Image (cartoon, rainbow, N blue to C red):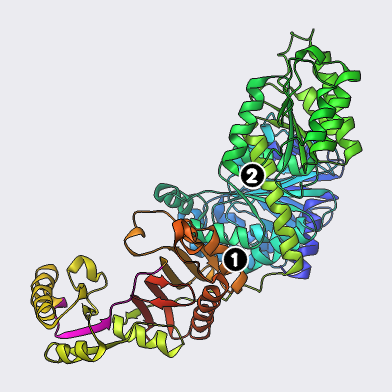
Amino acid sequence: MTPERTVNLKRLLKPRHIAFIGGRDAAIAIREARRRGFTGCMWAVNPKRTDLEGVQCVPSISDLPDVPDAVYLAIPADGVVVALRELAAIGAGGVVCFSAGFKEIGNIEAENSLKEATGDMALIGPNCYGLINYIDNTALWSFEHGGWSPGYGTAIVTQSGMFSSDITMSARSLPMAYMVSAGNQSVLGLEDFLNYFADDPAVRTIGLHIEGLQDIPAFEKAAIKAIKKGVAVVALKTGSSAIGSTLTVSHTGSLSGSNELYEALFKRCGVISVNNPAQFLETLKYLSVVDAPTDPSVVGFTCSGGGATMLADHAEKIGLTFPKVDVNGHKALRSLLPDIATVSNPLDYTTPIWGEPERTYPVFSGAMEKVAAAAALLVQDYPAAGLDASKIYYQNDANTFAKAAQEMRIPAAICSTLPENLDEETRRYLISLGIAPMQGIHEALNAIRAAATWSGCRERIIANQPKELLPSFTADELDMLTEDEGKRWLALHNINVPRGRSISARHVQDAAIEIGYPVVLKMMSKELIHKTEAGAVTLGIKNTKALHDAIDVMKHCVAEYHAKALTDNFLVEAMSPPPLAELIVNLRSDRQFGASLVLGSGGILTELVSDVITLLLPVTPTDIAQALQSLRAGQLLNGFRGRGIADINKVSLELYSLCEAFIQNRDQVAEIEINPMFIYPDHVIAVDALVGRILR
């Protein structure tokens, strides 16, 4: 985003005056601006009306009394480009373009004309609902909206207008700073808003509903900027399914992209990824109200044994810990609790002391001190409206819990078991105390876990910021090398491959004797990408007779599988000894994300076991080591059931060397797949390999 457009985006978000261009939709936007509390100048442009919602109309843009900071544009698509040129010519700040009929319906030419006409203006849309500034009480919005702000909060940017509207209407008391419906992102993309909001002191978190990103490197740069500033970014990525991806293209003209690559991007730059709207809002709320815990440990309180069990069960599933109460802590808490209470974490402090501040405060404070967890959580389900007789007991416990947490300087939340059992008055009151009002046990625990992970990511990024992603690269056509050709390329770049020879059938016996039995025999053909399915691989050949039998059987199988793949070219290799583990290693260029490394369980397990992790390049040896340890296959490298132990650092360095060779040769090679790669205690061997060379 240019400096001029950055200035104009600020004018658009914080306008002194707004021009509304259009008819009925513009009238609704005027009404919503008033309802939000906008007190600046409002002008209307409509040649056929005298006024819109009491605002006097002028017939054309040239008749406006002054240059508007912000414009709400809601006219037919065929008039948009002309209007934008006129607005750019007079120096308007920015435009919310509600009008549709561009890229989202395949009208690329019209979209390109719109971009050109915009000039240096900041344009949101087209095909969007607009923006709401809750801090300065400004709205350029297409429909009725809700939402509130205590003077700080989250900035949410969505690619769905209806979803953005749904969020403003949600009954969750999410502190709001801004809402932006980005639409087609023709001029301003999600990465531009992310970069801008990271600098706003009123913004504590940023929420992104992502269907597709346009500039991955810019997104990474902005996300790293945000996390270094202490602004948590939470992403809800949609369009991962086949149907969802298709709908994404038709919705805003965005490319959904690989879900695995997006997750790798989020992990790389410390973006919290969630998978449903409720978790999206609750995670934003938690981190907008309290600081992130420094580790995933919690001290929990309930007034119900069932609630304590629910906390413990879900925490175990997601990697949150409830540290045990030590002997000294047990003794101290035992003296404060009723006889029917069991000292534990989570702690059911029981109903005999419920709502009695002089008794619950020492329990809350003592447990927080003795357990020394990084976060605190109290479960409370408030009575429904009209059943207020017992509400004072809940409030008393909430107040003493908040007091204890503040004194211990520990991020604290109160959550209801069921989302609806925390009323609006209570939610806002808790926020005023600095307590996050969370709705749903699972949502609360998930948010705490995500916040703790984010805290660790922030430390990592501050200490060692990732290198910039590689430029995007697209190869129009690939030439898949045969396995022997691919292995020669790997060997040239210092990757171990089995000792072998590529030879015709008549010389196979000589090659096998030279190499030494047992050997592996493979038929070489560019048509044989999947040799196992074609019967083009025979393992463990122990003698000459078995070798000739293998050749005959192989020719027959391949002829039946794919006659054109039948050749007289064979690869004879030494049989590699059993490894500690088999991995699949894939490196490939990507037109959006630059390049990626995929690691996972290899060999026959690749398609049976979903055990993969994706990293975006460039990476460090440490990144690779951590990725290996995170795999289920990684357990096989650590002495599983008495097996040997691999030198993870050495293995990681060899994989890092492969990544660097790929990066240095991206103008020649677009993809490398090794499956399996055998992992031994002190080295690796590429047992099977495919290399995709770029055709010029």
Q: Give the CA distance from mark 2 to mark 1.
A: 24 Å
- From the viewer's side, name the closer residue of 264 and 104: 264
- The quarter in which the C terminus is drawn is bottom left
Rendered location of residue 595, percent (x, y): 51, 72
In the image, residue 337 sits, relative to residue 245, either above or below, namely: above
In the image, residue 247 sits, relative to residue 526, either above or below, namely: above
Q: Residue at x 73, y 39 (%)?
A: 298
Which residue in the structure is indicated by mark 2?
Answer: 129
Q: Can the viewer see residue 256 in this picture?
A: no
Q: Residue at x 56, y 61 (%)?
A: 264
**Residue 216 got which mark?**
1
What amino acid type is highlighted by mark number 1?
A: Ile
What amino acid type is highlighted by mark number 2?
A: Tyr
Q: Earlier in the sequence, mark 2 or mark 1?
A: 2
Rendered location of residue 339, percent (x, y): 77, 15
Q: Are marks 2 and 1 in contact (CB under 8 Å)?
A: no
**Residue 239 got which mark?**
none
Q: Which residues are magenta?
A: 565-579
